[in-house]
Image: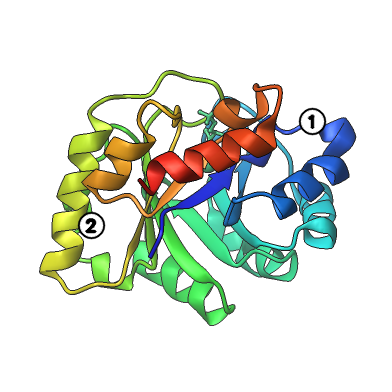
């Protein structure tokens, strides 16, 4: 499988969201990455269902929703209705992670778990087989445009090993500070999905930037 590029909508131009959706639809991106923040789990508030509805209307690719919220179980059904195909909750926000993942799957979505930079991969030892995806945070969640934490490479390799050891089908996603400088090494370490916000939308030609990232990651 080739490495998927998932542009982060958080860095899009909200005044021109339909235009940015059309750009992503035409691009080499495989997924849309959708960051939902509640101002409690993370020190920032992003957007919720009104923006999800715009994405559902215009996006022709998988909506990969990353919930940076407390008590995510309360909203699983709403996100399924809003068009999420992959729904990722934070390890640190779930007291009963197994139940949360089961609920997500029950609603027809792929279930993901996100790990903050300080959360060890080994915390997933007992649950890796139940994760369709693990999102490795390579910045502290809350904001786009932050510097990549280098230790992420080690975490991705360790996670890849855990997945193989358990014969699991789990995808590895890396989120935060991804750019043309680290896309290839992350793919080599085992990443299947690379999220890119600032590296895509802060460039004059996001369409070519996505193409270049896709090419580098798959080279
Ligand atoms: C951070 C979000 C990321 C963010 C990535 O909390 O989860 O998805 O949008 O943005 P960049 O690529 O700019 O670090
Ligand atoms: Zn994210």
Asked which secondary structure carries label 2, the reply is helix
Q: State if disc 2 and disc 1 touch (CB < 8 Å).
A: no
Which corner quadrant of the image does residue 17 belong to? Answer: top right
Q: Position of residue 96 (x, y in %)?
A: 37, 62
Q: Which mark is residue 124?
A: 2
Q: Nearer the viewer, residue 61 or 38?
A: 61
Single out the residue that lies furthest toward the top.
Answer: 147
Residue that protrudes farthest toward the left in the picture: 165
Give the Cα separation between the discs numbered 1 and 2: 36 Å
Q: Select label 1 or label 2 by which is in front.
A: 1
Q: Position of residue 10 (x, y in %)?
A: 66, 35
Circle 2 residues within 10 Å: few <14, some 14–19, many ≥20: some
Residue visible at 48% across and 19% down in the picture? 146
Q: Position of residue 130 (x, y in %)?
A: 32, 72
Q: State the quadrant of the C terminus.
A: top left
Dot label at residue 24 = none
Question: Between 24 and 146, which is closer to the camera in this rendering?
Answer: 24
Residue at 78% from the left image edge and 54% from the top image edge: 55
Say whether residue 207 is left or right of residue 20. left
Looking at the image, residue 74 lies above or below residue 69? below
Residue visible at 44% across and 29% down? Answer: 180
- The N terminus is located in which quarter? bottom left
Disc 1, SS: loop
Q: Residue at x 73, y 52 (%)?
A: 26
- Estimate the x, y position of residue 21 in percent, counting from the top left: 78, 48
Sequence-wise, which precedes: disc 1 or disc 2? 1
On the image, numbered disc 1 is attached to which residue?
13
Q: Dot 1, how many residues are within 10 Å of its Cα: few (below 14), some (14-19), or many (20+)?
A: few
């Amino acid at each position: 499988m080739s490495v998927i590029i998932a542009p982060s909508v958080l860095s899009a131009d909200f005044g021109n969201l339909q235009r940015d959706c059309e750009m992503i639809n035409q691009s080499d991106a495989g997924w849309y990455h959708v960051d939902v923040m509640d101002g409690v789990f993370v020190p920032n508030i992003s957007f919720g269902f009104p923006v999800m509805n715009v994405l559902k209307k215009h996006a022709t690719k998988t909506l990969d929703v990353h919930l940076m919220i407390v008590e995510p179980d309360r909203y699983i059904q709403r996100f399924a209705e809003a068009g999420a195909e992959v729904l990722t909750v934070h390890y640190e926000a779930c007291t009963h992670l197994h139940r949360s993942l089961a609920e997500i799957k029950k609603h027809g979505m792929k279930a993901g778990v996100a790990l903050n930079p300080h959360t060890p991969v080994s915390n997933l030892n007992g649950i890796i087989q139940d994760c369709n995806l693990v999102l490795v945070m390579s910045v502290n969640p809350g904001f786009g445009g932050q510097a990549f934490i280098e230790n992420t490479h080690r975490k991705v390799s360790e996670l890849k090993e855990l997945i193989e050891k358990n014969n699991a089908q789990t995808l590895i996603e890396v989120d935060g500070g991804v750019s043309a400088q680290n896309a290839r090494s992350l793919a080599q370490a085992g990443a299947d999905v690379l999220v890119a916000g600032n590296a895509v939308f802060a460039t004059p030609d996001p369409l070519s930037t996505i193409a270049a990232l896709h090419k580098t990651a798959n080279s």
